[in-house]
Amino acid sequence: MTNNEFNVHFMEYSVSQKTTLHTDYMNHDRPSCRTSEKVAISSDLYRKALAAFASSVIVASTTDRHGEAQGFTATAFSAVSLAPPIVQFCLTNSATCYDAFASADSYAISVLGPDQESMAQRFATRGADKFANGAGLVKRGGLWVVKGAQAVLICRSYGKLVCGDHTIFLGEVIDAEAMEAPDLMIYFRKKYLSKRTSDFS
Ligand SMILES: Cc1cc2nc3c(=O)[nH]c(=O)nc-3n(C[C@H](O)[C@H](O)[C@H](O)COP(=O)(O)O)c2cc1C
């Protein structure tokens, strides 16, 4: 599927009876979607409902045009396609690292495990020295990833779609590594929860 075909797929994507996403297919460089009617839901209620959705936590990392490493913490991440292998994450349009991801050819996803809450906080802090001389990080495919992550996905940029105040970034997975242990860290109701292999037995 080409990036332009991706635009057309989103034209048909309906999110509710009241709201339909339309693709701005005139602008192939920066495809976007918009809501056709104002959605009558309070921001507080929306956030509260989303907080009930438990998710893994990832760190997305890339390199900007100047060769500087950039990255951020996200829970808005999921698999999209198995063949070809495509994943997606959503990044706020106002992020400092936005331009780096928007112009990147490749990026890495590190799925955080137990005891990596501080890494999540570090990459969620604007202005922090996130890469701090590579502390707690290791290079994979030329990109910094989190050392000891539960899984790492190296992605080639596949397309993006501006959607409201965020942008959906699609990445084709070209390499991956995964830990065997079913240790996990999830984010639920604004708290980090960790489970280790021994907790399951
Ligand atoms: C647990 C957690 C999950 C987050 N998920 C997202 C997300 O999915 N998308 C996003 O844009 N920001 C998310 N954030 C906020 C960003 O990590 C944070 O705003 C980051 O500093 C943005 O990058 P910047 O420093 O380059 O501006 C999350 C923060 C936390 C603590």
Image (tube, grey):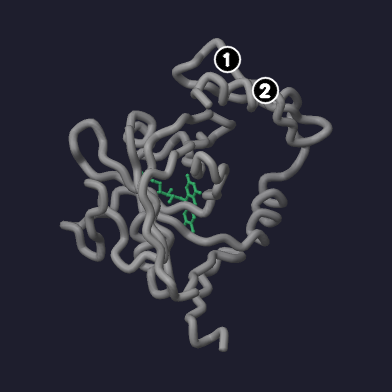
Out of 130 and 112, give the one closest to the viewer.
112
Quarter of the figure that contains the C terminus: bottom right
Out of 135 and 124, give the one closest to the viewer.
135
Out of 40 and 83, give the one closest to the viewer.
83
Res 64 seen here? yes
Q: In this view, does 124 lie to the left or right of 130?
A: right
Give the residue displayed 29% in from the left and 44% down from the top. Answer: 70
Count of numbered marks: 2
Q: Identify the amino acid type marked 2.
A: Met
Which residue is the site of mark 1?
25
Q: Residue furthest left?
A: 133
Q: Any mark on residue 185, and which?
A: none
Out of 172 and 146, give the one closest to the viewer.
172
Q: In this view, does 160 lie to the left or right of 130?
A: right
Badges 2 and 1: C-beta atoms under 8 Å apart? yes
Near mark 1 (Cα within 10 A), the count class, few <14, some 14-19 or many ≥20, is some
Q: Identify the amino acid type marked 1.
A: Tyr
Res 124 seen here? no
Q: In this view, does 125 lie to the left or right of 80?
A: left
Give the residue displayed 30% in from the left and 56% down from the top. Answer: 145
- Above or below — where is 104 with respect to 36? below
Which residue is the site of mark 2?
11
